[in-house]
Image: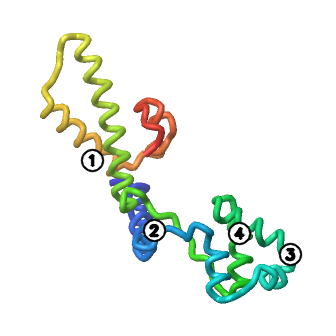
Amino acid sequence: MPARADTQWLQLRQTEAQLARFRKVALERPPASGWIAAVRQAIGMSVAQLADRLHISRTSVAKMEQREADGGITLDALRRAADALDCDVVYAIVPRAGSLERAVKARADLIAGTLVSRAGHSMSLEAQTVGREVTTAQQQVIARRLLAEWPRDLWDAWWDRRTGDGGV
């Protein structure tokens, strides 16, 4: 395995360890009104009181709460509001595939499938088709090689255009 791939796998596993604590939290959804309004109301703080703590108008607080509910708030604004509520913002990006390793493996499988199907298409034009078992075995070999080498173009967008996937 090339040194770059070793380093990449080490970094992946270290990041996985950090993300492990967030997997369960990622399944939770924020309140419809957003966390700022929910926490403010839960502790009995008025919009005027929060506005005073943030040194902004009540209208600005209402807009901030609405932006959070709509998904348009900035992290900086969310952190300022959290601080004024004596709270912290907890932030993570959690992989939809369940783990970063699964995401990388799925990407390698997608690329391997693209490469094998392209070769299969060329062979079928020459009336030289191979069976499904051989095709699957070829895909697995290519995917393992991609994972062992971890090429720099693994996440290049041009693979998405080739597969019609739009990103994995």
The picture quadrant where one finds residue 111 is: top left
Q: Is residue 147 above or below residue 136?
A: below
- Is residue 15 visible in the rendered structure shown here? no
> In which image quadrant can residue 53 be found?
bottom right
**Disc 1 marks which residue?**
144
Q: Give the farthest residue toward the top.
A: 126
First in sequence: mark 2 vs mark 1: 2
Tag 4: Cα neighbours inside 10 Å, few (<14), some, or many (≥20)? many
The residue indicated by pointer 4 is 65
Specify few, some or many for label 2: CA neighbours under 10 Å numbering under 14, 14-19, or 20 or more. few
Q: Nearer the viewer, residue 50 or 164?
A: 50
Q: Secondary structure at mark 1?
A: helix
Q: Which percent across, then down, holds residue 58?
A: 83, 74
Disc number lying in front (3 or 2): 3
Q: Is the residue marked by circle 3 packed among few (<14), some (14-19), or many (20+) residues within 10 Å? A: few
Residue 130 image offset from top left, x and y in percent:
15, 24
Which residue is label 3 attached to? 56
**Local crowd at mark 1 within 10 Å, few (<14), some, or many (≥20)?**
some
Q: Residue drawn 63% across and 60% down?
A: 71
| Whole-number angstrom distance, CA of label 1 to CA of label 4 | 48 Å
Q: Distance of mark 3 from mark 1, alpha carbons? A: 56 Å
- Name the one closer to the observer, 53 or 23: 53
Q: Amino acid at mark 1?
A: Arg
> Dot 2 lies on which element?
helix
Say which residue label 2 marks. Answer: 26
Task: Report the amino acid beneath label 4.
Answer: Glu
